[in-house]
Amino acid sequence: MPRKRDKGNGGSPGVLVCDRINLNESGVGQRLLEVLQELVVSGEATVRELRVVDRYYFSVSGPPIAAEPGWYIICDGAHRPLYVGTAGDLNYRLNDQEGTLDGFAAWGRLSDPERNFIKRLVSNGFLDTLSAVIVPERKLRTRLNIEAPLSKRDRANVEKFLNIFRSHVVMSRVKPTGQERV
């Protein structure tokens, strides 16, 4: 039997806790998936090579990423999505030594986040190349006609949604033959 929730917790039984992107409403999930795919296919969600530097840090190729909120999907060399993350500042999270460290250089860690596993698997040769699909919040909001900013809850919900549908989003940039769209 479901437990009773205190109204202060925000959720009703069987209903997702959402703000402006209400994934409980019919069609919202489909529209969100379509917009994410459109951003990838159009190039508005950029794809950049992601390197592991000195075993501890991530660094993206090319010029710095805009310092804005959004989401990213780390993929292997075959474009298979490995990890989905959210960031208040995409450049800091993907291209700054402090923002990409994830405590990996600290002694006495009891466990490591998935991002550290990815770094180690690249460093030991298990994974060869990485890329990051970068989705700026501003571009998603524009396509969904939502004014700035998204709430932390909406950002977290989009991250969860992306995690569930990451293959659908990433593979929208690959032709059925396996070749990237040009």
Image: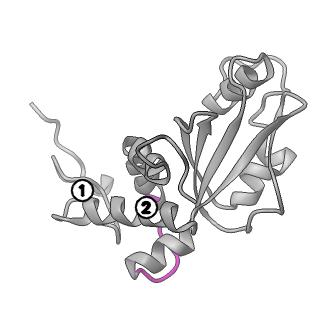
- Badge 1 vs badge 2, beta-carbon distance below 8 Å: no
In the current view of this chain or complex, which residue is farthest to the left?
A: 1
Q: Which mark is residue 23?
A: none
Give the CA separation, mark 1 to mark 2.
33 Å
Residue occupied by mark 1: 7
| 1 or 2: tag closer to the N-terminus | 1
The residue segment tinted magenta is: 146-153
Kindly indicate the quadrant of the structure image that contains residue 26.
bottom left
Q: Which residue is drawn at 61% across and 29% down?
A: 114
Horizontal and vertical percent position of residue 161: 38, 50
**Pick the front one: 180 or 61:** 180
Q: Residue at x 34, y 63 (%)?
A: 34
Residue occupied by mark 2: 36
Q: Is residue 108 left or right of residue 19?
A: right
Q: Which residue is drawn at 74% across and 67% down?
A: 67
> Quadrant of the image for the C terminus?
bottom right
Mainly helix, strand or loop, the magenta region?
Answer: loop
Q: How crowded is mark 2: few (under 14 residues within 10 Å), some or many (20 or more)?
A: many
Report helix, strand or loop for mark 2: helix
Is 150 above or below relative to 4? below
**Three-letter amino acid code of the residue under disc 2:** Leu
